[in-house]
Image: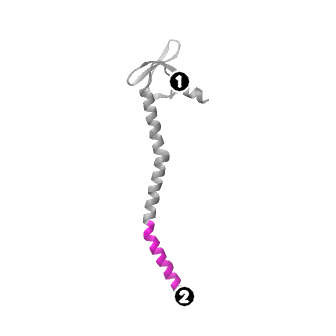
Amino acid sequence: MSTLIILQEQATKTATGAGGNWTFLIMMAAIFVVMYFLMIRPQKKRQKELKEYRDNLKKGDKVITAGGIYGTITEVKENYVLLEVDANVKIRVDKSTLVKDSSDIQQGS
């Protein structure tokens, strides 16, 4: 009787072992899909929005650099902008260092 139970358990393990590979592949695909929608897609969306923001900068916009410098744009060129940070104090910064419009941050507080 006990040998019959052991043979039956082995047959069950063999049958589920073959389907285990498909289950593993389906689970890996599901994990990839979840990671794509939770991590990759939102990051691409943020990058696209930031690129559009930097491409649409114009004179008079208030901005913040990655270093935390607040300023007003006085001139826009292809790769950099000229910021007025105080009366008669202007600095040239690369567009890639501009992170946000300062009015967005002040409204969020």
| Image quadrant occupied by the C terminus | top right
Of residue 93 and residue 71, the one placed in the foreground of this image is 71
Q: Amino acid at mark 2?
A: Met
Coordinates of residue 108 in the picture (x, y in percent): 59, 30
Specify the farthest residue to the left: 78
Q: Left or right? Give the position of 103 relative to 14.
A: right
Question: Image quadrant for the N terminus?
Answer: bottom right
Label 1 to label 2, Cα distance in Å?
82 Å
Which tag is nearer the camera, tag 1 or tag 2?
2
Q: Residues within 10 Å of mark 2 (few under 14, many from 20)?
A: few
Q: Secondary structure at mark 1?
A: loop
The answer to which of 5 and 92 lies nearer the viewer is 5
Q: Position of residue 47 (x, y in %)?
A: 45, 36
Which disc number belongs to residue 69?
A: 1
Q: Which residues are magenta?
A: 4-20
Q: Residue furthest top?
A: 88
Where 6 sits versus 49, above or below? below
Query: Can you give x and y, in whole percent of width and height, for residue 35 in the image?
Result: 48, 49
Q: Is residue 66 above or below residue 29?
A: above
List x then y, in percent, for residue 63.
51, 24
Q: Residue at x 47, y 59 (%)?
A: 27
Principal SS element in the magenta part? Answer: helix
Q: Residue at x 44, y 56 (%)?
A: 29
Question: Which is more N-terminal, label 2 or label 1?
Answer: 2
Q: Residue tagged by mark 2?
A: 1
Kind of residue sitting beneath label 1: Ile
